[in-house]
Amino acid sequence: MSGPGFHPPPPQREDVSARRVLAVLGAVLTLFALSVWATVPILRAGAPAEARESRVPGEVGHATVGRVNQEPFDLDTRAEELRERQRHQLSSYGWVDRDAGVIHVPIERAVELLLQQEPEAPE
């Protein structure tokens, strides 16, 4: 937009008083302090009782700190134990819910029984 009739506006002087800057800064810091003060009781109420009673998060020497498992992967055997329980249930007979009369059977036997059933006619 340069041309013979174009004249840029003169530079404007910015008058920002130090008093106004300090007032805004004080308001922001006060708001931050009030937010922290209001948040601390909410965070403490959501924490487990043992964490509220002690200053140390979790107990030293335990694998779990709060809700986080801190145990090294090569020492954690929970996945293998779960897999073994699942293999045992897939290869054995047993009750799932005795009151409801629900049992589990080995997977091979369940497939055999399913294949012996006659197919249902589509409606």
Image (cartoon, helix red, strand yellow):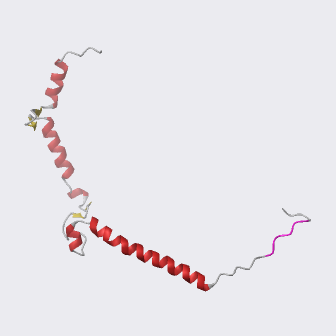
Residue drawn at x 27%, y 67% as measured from the top left: 45
Residue drawn at x 13%, y 38% as measured from the top left: 89
* Residue 7 belongs to magenta span: yes
* Residue 70 belongs to magenta span: no
Is residue 37 placed above or below 84 in the rendered structure?
Answer: below
**Quadrant placement of the N terminus:** bottom right
Q: Tell me if I can see residue 17 in this picture.
A: yes
The answer to which of 71 and 9 lies nearer the viewer is 9
Is residue 27 placed above or below 6 in the rendered structure?
Answer: below
Main structural element of the magenta stretch: helix, strand or loop?
Answer: loop
Q: Is residue 81 left or right of residue 3?
A: left
Where in the figure is residue 7, as x and y percent of width and height? 86, 69
Where in the figure is residue 42, as x and y percent of width and height? 32, 68
Q: Is residue 25 left or right of residue 14?
A: left
The answer to which of 63 and 54 lies nearer the viewer is 54
The answer to which of 36 and 71 lies nearer the viewer is 36
**Quadrant placement of the C terminus:** top left
Residue drawn at x 18%, y 22% as measured from the top left: 114
Q: Tell me if I can see residue 69 in this picture.
A: no
Q: Quadrant of residue 35?
A: bottom left
Where in the figure is residue 77, as x and y percent of width and height? 19, 53
Residue drawn at x 18%, y 69% as measured from the top left: 61
Q: Quadrant of residue 68?
A: bottom left
Is residue 88 placed above or below 46 in the rendered structure?
Answer: above
Q: Is residue 47 left or right of residue 16?
A: left
The magenta segment = 5-10
Most extreme residue toward the right is 4
The answer to which of 50 and 28 lies nearer the viewer is 28
Q: Quadrant of residue 13?
A: bottom right
